[in-house]
Image (spheres, grey):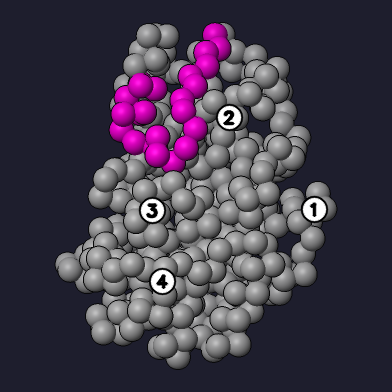
Amino acid sequence: MIVPIYLENNTAIKYNVTIDTLPKLTYNRKVAIVTNTTVSALHLETLKSKINADELFVVTVEDGEEFKNLATVESILNQLFEHKLDRKSLLIALGGGVIGDMTGFTASLYQRGIGFVQVPTTLLSQVDASVGGKTGVNNSYGKNLIGAFYQPEAVFIDTEFLKTLPKREFAAGIAEIVKMAVMFDKAYFDFLMEADFRKKAVLEKVIQRSVELKAEVVNLDEKESGIRAVLNYGHTFGHVVENETNYKTYLHGEAVAIGIMMVNALAVELKMMTQIEMNLVTKFLEKHDLPTKYEIKEVDAFYDKFFLDKKAANNKLKFILPQGIGGHMIRDDISKDVLKKVLKAF
């Protein structure tokens, strides 16, 4: 499939999203693969065997969300300079969302911008993080607060990479899949409730539908000034959970699942979602062994961290809320009392 991304000046850039066996890749330029220690041991040789380039280098970083920071980006940049990459060179991100985000951000910075390609190896990155051009890193104030919108040249999605994915990592990707369905497509949600993710054809269909939905949204709003914010369903709460646990307790998708539970509880409180609909989403999350409970130690501290969210503006908090299953609404008029009432339930 080809994903067109329409920029703010209404011009379009297009890149291929290939959902198939990883093809042979030929580049008449210098190429650097950016990966981490875990993925390198599993998949680096497979990718290298597919690449024909003028020169090929490998940059390996530590594995883990705690390494998604400016220090790691600087270390990648330094190695690119040491290998004398130029403005025509290419970076290839081999890994999950952390590697994809950091590689894209590094590509946007190196000599004011070079090309990069995504080869996502986790379900979360295949259905969400690798498409749409969001790049960035975390800092002590929160998640992805430093970054850029920078589109890849291509995305190559091969489900074979998922065979080595731990069960917990696979489930984390499912949280991002159900996010799309609850926000935009009830029929897709109904399909997911019965889907057997162990079947290759089903998995590829799920990945394709998720990518299609994301591309449709990004086309309407590349820089997240409006509807693209809806893709953050569950994330406003989930990012606080990640921050409170220093990015070490939960995988990103697990934190999103907890965030979905919290925002669904808010939607029920506001009568935007029925308890029956909330229970259906909860059942889906639990079916795939995703966490649905979290103990908030200090409600006031949790609430204050909302203001570090990128959607907060003019001291107003924006929340992405489900309208039943298949609909959504962005609201910035929810009172502090209502929010704290919901938080206290956790």
* Label 3, label 2: how far apart the Cα atoms are: 22 Å
Compared with 242, 98 (above or below) is above
Q: Secondary structure at mark 3?
A: loop
The residue labelled by disc 3 is 245
Q: Which mark is residue 38?
A: 2
**Foreground pick, 226 / 272:** 272
Visible in this render: residue 293? Answer: yes
Question: Which corner quadrant of the image does residue 136 belong to?
Answer: top left
Residue 305: x %, y % from top left: 26, 62
User: What segment carries the magenta color?
Assistant: 55-77
Identify which amino acid the numbered label 3 is placed on.
Thr
Choose the circle earlier in sequence order: 3 or 2.
2
Q: Which mark is residue 198?
A: 1
Rendered residue at 53%/57% (across/down): 254
Q: Which residue is painted at 71% across and 31% down in the image?
A: 22
Residue 182 lies, in percent from the top left, at 57, 72
Circle 4 is placed at which residue position? 320
